[in-house]
């Protein structure tokens, strides 16, 4: 047989390979991308050839694609929220502008009414003055 040190080395390698396979199974099941990538790197460094390695590699590709799609969807949602917020602020500004214009119209109408009242009062005063002047 093998000298005991080589036998121990073989057992250590075997334990490591079993650990890698166990981790691959666990992380494939859990769909844990970061841990899968890490464990696949360990599997490659040992030269492990197993259907599980190929399955894990395919899953990594799939999970990365799903992650990219999710990121794209989140970015789209964020842009949509920003656009809705921009439109809401724009509408709010338009509303405030309309209120300011309406307030200005009311102020001008009140001023015009006051000026008209003043003119009527002045006309009445003028008529009163004329009546006081004796004819002739």
Image: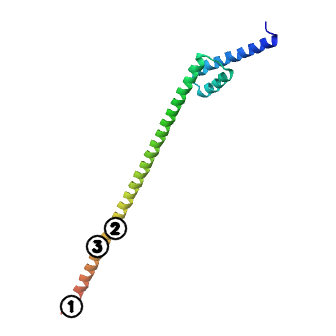
Colouring scheme applied when the structure was drawn: rainbow
First reached walking from the N terminus: tag 2 or tag 3: 2
Q: In the rendered structure, find residue 116 and report the number of the disc placed on it.
A: 3
Q: How many marks?
A: 3
**Quarter holding the C terminus?**
bottom left
| Mark 1 residue element | loop
Relative side of 27 to 16, left or right: left
Looking at the image, the residue that sits furthest to the left is 136
Looking at the image, the residue that sits furthest to the bottom is 136
The quarter holding residue 59 reads: top right
Q: Residue at x 23, y 86 (%)?
A: 130
Residue 29 visible in the shown view: no
Label 3: few (<14), some (14–19) or many (≥20) C-alpha neighbours in 10 Å: few
Residue 21: x and y, percent?
64, 17
First reached walking from the N terminus: tag 1 or tag 3: 3
| Mark 3 residue element | helix
Vertical order, 78 against 115 (above or below): above
Residue 43: x and y, percent?
65, 21
Answer whether labels 1 and 2 touch (C-beta < 8 Å): no
Residue position marked by numbered label 1 in the rendering:
134
Give the CA distance from mark 1 to mark 3: 29 Å
Give the CA distance from mark 1 to mark 2: 41 Å
Vertical order, 98 against 59 (above or below): below
Residue position marked by numbered label 2 in the rendering:
108
Vertical order, 109 against 67 (above or below): below
Answer whether labels 1 and 3 touch (C-beta < 8 Å): no
Q: Residue at x 63, y 17 (%)?
A: 49
| Mark 2 residue element | helix
Between 56 and 5, the one nearer to me in the picture: 5
Q: Residue at x 70, y 18 (%)?
A: 16
């Amino acid at each position: 047989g093998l000298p005991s040190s080589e036998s121990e080395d073989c057992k250590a390698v075997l334990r490591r390979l079993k650990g890698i396979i166990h981790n691959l199974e666990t992380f494939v099941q859990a769909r844990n991308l970061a841990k899968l990538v890490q464990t696949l790197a360990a599997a490659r460094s040992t030269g492990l050839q197993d259907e599980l390695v190929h399955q894990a590699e395919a899953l990594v590709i799939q999970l990365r694609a799903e992650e990219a799609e999710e990121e794209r969807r989140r970015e789209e949602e964020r842009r949509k929220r920003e656009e809705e917020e921009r439109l809401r602020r724009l509408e709010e500004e338009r509303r405030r502008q309309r209120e300011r214009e309406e307030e200005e119209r009311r102020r001008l109408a009140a001023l015009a009414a006051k000026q008209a009242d003043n003119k009527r009062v002045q006309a009445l005063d003028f008529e009163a003055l004329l009546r006081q002047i004796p004819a002739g």
